[in-house]
Amino acid sequence: MPGHPLPSHRAPRSGARPDAMFEDFASVLFPVSGVRVSMFVPPLVAFAISAVTSTAGVSGAFLILPFQVSWLRYTAPSVSATNFVYNLVAIPGGVYRYIREGRMAWPLTWVVTAGTLPGVFFGYWLRVRYLLDPRNFKAFVGCVLLYLGLRLLADVAGRAHRPATQTAALEEKFRRHAEEAARGRGAPLAAGLPPAAVVRTKSVTLERVVYEFWGQEFSFSTPAMFALALIVGVIGGAYGIGGGAMIAPICVALFRLPVYTVAGAALMGTFLTSAAGVIFYSLVPLQAGVSHAPDWLLGILFGLGGIPGMYCGARLQKFLPQKYLKLVLGCLITFLAVNYLRQYFQH
């Protein structure tokens, strides 16, 4: 019941407690989730995570969820809804920055959203009906993310297929621009993208979307992107990650789209699907006796830290070469995959 501790939300306490360090200073009890933690911990953790992940179009929810499960020991299905609340509060700052700088690929955003929205509902249905013990599903997610993460890392290391001509040309333009700007001003921040580096839509059809960025043309298959977004929506709906953690590497690694144009679209798609996720978890109870509704206070505290983190990440993204963004994203995705698989084999 809302307003009362639900013991089933937290794992049995035995041996060392990984969350003990967070209960020592100004700790409070969050009655919906049963979590006891300092009010300062959620926003600080969210700021650190989102400042890094938002540079690659990822809200950080895919790392905040393991933090809640492993450190705060919040394991009920409502933890997924709480993660969606974090997305709702934190993402607008980063999205605003991408829109302001003209780097929002709107056709990509709408295709991704159209696919993930129905997927979120099915993910919620799977979570509360069949995945109260998410062990097997975590193994599946871990395998998918491990493939994407290792592919990104291999691409950075030069062992994957050579990037598309357009992407290679874009990287070379970024390198030259950074060198010229650094020589002209002598300041590291001068290495950002020029004002001309904005997204311009060229054509949108049911078969293909084509857009231009910084003089280079990029495209993707509309049905293929929609189908992959639907699968991602199912996974995101079950775990409360919104889908950005998977959509971003899919767009970069499989569709060969530049991360400069993917980041904003992935964040916007995650925001819209998170809104749907909160509604599903709050208003559509599919199993009696199981807590679905989010812990709003906990989710908002995470979100308050994510707002400046997202904005800082979006601001810094254009100053980083794409290969370093791929490296960051690849490492984060691989870390999450290994963590999921480790949990599977430990049981």
Image: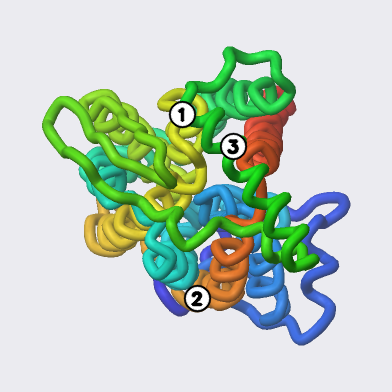
Horizontally, residue 16 falls left or right of residue 29, namely right
- The crowd level at tag 2 (other Cα within 10 Å; few <14, some 14-19, many 20+) is many
Label 2, label 3: how far apart the Cα atoms are: 38 Å
Q: Position of residue 257 (x, y in %)?
A: 44, 34
- The crowd level at tag 1 (other Cα within 10 Å; few <14, some 14-19, many 20+) is some
First reached walking from the N terminus: tag 1 or tag 2: 1
First reached walking from the N terminus: tag 2 or tag 3: 3
Horizontally, residue 320 falls left or right of residue 137, namely right
Q: Position of residue 76 (x, y in %)?
A: 50, 53
**Is there CB contact under 8 Å for labels 2 and 3?**
no
First reached walking from the N terminus: tag 3 or tag 1: 1
Q: Quadrant of residue 298?
A: bottom right
**Camera-side residue of 124 and 262:** 262
In the image, what residue occupies the spot 17% across and 38% down?
203
Q: Which numbered dot is residue 171?
A: 3
Residue corresponding to mark 2: 300
In the image, what residue occupies the spot 34% across and 40% down?
233
Residue corresponding to mark 1: 166
Q: Secondary structure at mark 3?
A: helix
**Is there CB contact under 8 Å for labels 1 and 2?**
no
**Is there CB contact under 8 Å for labels 3 and 1?**
no
What amino acid is labelled 1 in the image? Gln
**Camera-side residue of 253 and 37:** 253
Residue 170 drawn above or below residue 41? above
Q: Position of residue 300 (x, y in %)?
A: 50, 75
What amino acid is labelled 2 in the image? Ile
